[in-house]
């Protein structure tokens, strides 16, 4: 017997929906079809739903369940976001009026953790492994997202297939001063912190967090740091230069801070189930994980390194992971 779920990956700028088929006998999840649309191309939540249904050729009300992984906080009626969505996200009322099946609106990185509970992890094409450590199935694991923002969610898989998810908002953590770094990396770190501090004093809400570096906006900050005569460069323009090999110092610095953040998260969670990195910026710059600076950043926090080197580490590369993870959530909770 199969069930059909509609799953959403709803971000601040775009939404991807998928039609996910769940086979109850084998617990297999397959994304049969997906459709993506920018929120700027929609006029309301109802209009967004209409366009998603047209793209999938499948009605929300026909599904066995709907799971929406979304940026922001769902209060049981509305989806709220620090940077407001272009229109009210009144999911509870809409679901009632449109006679939706059981549904849930969950934190956007919860589906990423849930995807790691599935056979998705057994397919090499889906993962860029950064070490050879095996996954401990019931160990704590962390999903880390580097994109427009910086997100994270930890979770634990139980033996019966159910799970526990944590509550985290790590993107707002201040940038750590590495306890152990060589002189070159430390000098660069001090100069970059000075630059970001001067830049932040010009802003309404001054702050220096990991999001100032490990996001699309962060890469633009790095470009201005290394090329101070350049102003108002967009993250997309920086991304093109990084992929073309025109800004190796930015790649090295970006890689080092990803490593520093990963090391910090390893110490915070001690995740025996691994840290799994994803997000648009990470996936579009996979070569940063091959640079020596990445592991130099991890080793800049050397405490408990013997245990930490046994934790799996990898990048989730398949863009369907959020849809599959929401399917797993729907199968177990809805």
Image: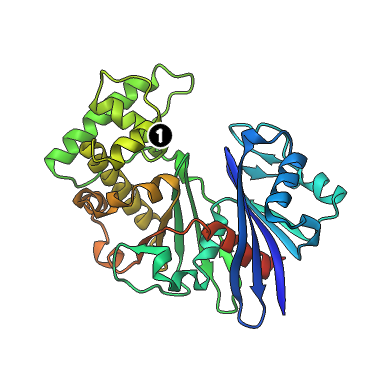
For the C terminus, give its image quadrant.
bottom right
Q: Looking at the image, can residue 212 be seen? A: no
Query: Between residues 88 and 246, which one lies in front from this camera angle?
Result: 246
Side of 203 relative to 130 (left or right): right
Query: Between residues 273 and 319, which one lies in front from this camera angle?
Result: 319
Q: Position of residue 37 (x, y in %)?
A: 61, 43
Under tag 1, what secondary structure?
helix
> Can you identify the residue that label 1 sits on?
236
Q: Splitting the image into 4 quarters, where does residue 197 fall?
A: top left
Q: Looking at the image, can residue 319 be seen? A: yes
Q: Residue at x 19, y 52 (%)?
A: 292
User: Dot 1, how many residues are within 10 Å of its Cα: few (below 14), some (14-19), or many (20+)?
Assistant: some
Query: Between residues 208 and 234, which one lies in front from this camera angle?
Result: 234
Q: Position of residue 257 (x, y in %)?
A: 30, 43
Q: Residue at x 12, y 40 (%)?
A: 183
Question: Residue furthest toward the bottom?
Answer: 25
The answer to whether residue 251 is above or below residue 121 is: above
Side of 174 relative to 167 (left or right): left
Q: Residue at x 26, y 57 (%)?
A: 303
Side of 115 relative to 78 (left or right): left
Q: Residue at x 28, y 46 (%)?
A: 255
Q: Position of residue 124 (x, y in %)?
A: 39, 69
For the N terminus, give its image quadrant.
bottom right
Q: Splitting the image into 4 quarters, where does residue 110 fall?
A: bottom right
The answer to whether residue 270 is above or below residue 148 is: below
Q: Position of residue 282 (x, y in %)?
A: 38, 48
């Amino acid at each position: 017997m199969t069930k059909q779920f509609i799953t959403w990956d709803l971000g601040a700028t775009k939404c991807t929906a998928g039609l996910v088929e769940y086979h109850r006998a084998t617990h297999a999840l397959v994304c049969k079809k997906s459709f993506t649309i920018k929120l700027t191309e929609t006029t309301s939540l109802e209009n967004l739903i209409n366009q998603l249904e047209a793209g999938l050729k499948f009605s929300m009300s026909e599904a066995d369940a709907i799971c929406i992984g979304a940026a922001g906080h769902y209060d049981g009626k509305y989806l709220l976001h620090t940077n407001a969505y272009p229109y009210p996200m009144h999911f509870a009322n809409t679901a009632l009026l449109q006679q939706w099946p059981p549904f849930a609106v969950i934190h956007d990185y919860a589906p990423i953790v849930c995807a790691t509970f599935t056979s998705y992890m057994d397919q090499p094409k889906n993962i860029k492994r950064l070490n050879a450590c095996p996954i401990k199935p019931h160990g704590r694991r962390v999903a880390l997202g580097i994109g427009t923002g910086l997100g994270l969610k930890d979770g634990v898989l139980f033996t019966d297939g159910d799970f526990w998810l944590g509550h985290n908002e790590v993107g707002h953590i201040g940038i750590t001063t590495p306890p152990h770094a060589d002189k070159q990396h430390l000098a660069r770190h001090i100069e970059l912190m000075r630059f970001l501090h001067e830049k932040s004093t010009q802003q309404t809400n001054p702050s220096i967090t990991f999001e100032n570096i490990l996001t699309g906006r962060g890469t633009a900050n790095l470009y201005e740091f290394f090329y101070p005569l350049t102003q108002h460069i967009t993250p997309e323009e920086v991304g093109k230069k990084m992929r073309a090999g025109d800004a190796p110092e930015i790649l090295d610095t970006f890689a080092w801070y990803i490593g520093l953040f990963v090391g910090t998260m390893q110490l915070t969670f001690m995740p025996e189930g691994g840290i799994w990195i994803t997000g648009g910026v990470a996936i579009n710059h996979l070569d940063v994980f091959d640079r020596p600076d990445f592991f130099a950043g991890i080793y800049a926090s050397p405490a408990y390194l013997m245990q930490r080197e046994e934790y799996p580490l990898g990048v989730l590369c398949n863009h369907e992971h959020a849809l599959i993870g929401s399917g797993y959530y729907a199968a177990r909770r809805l």
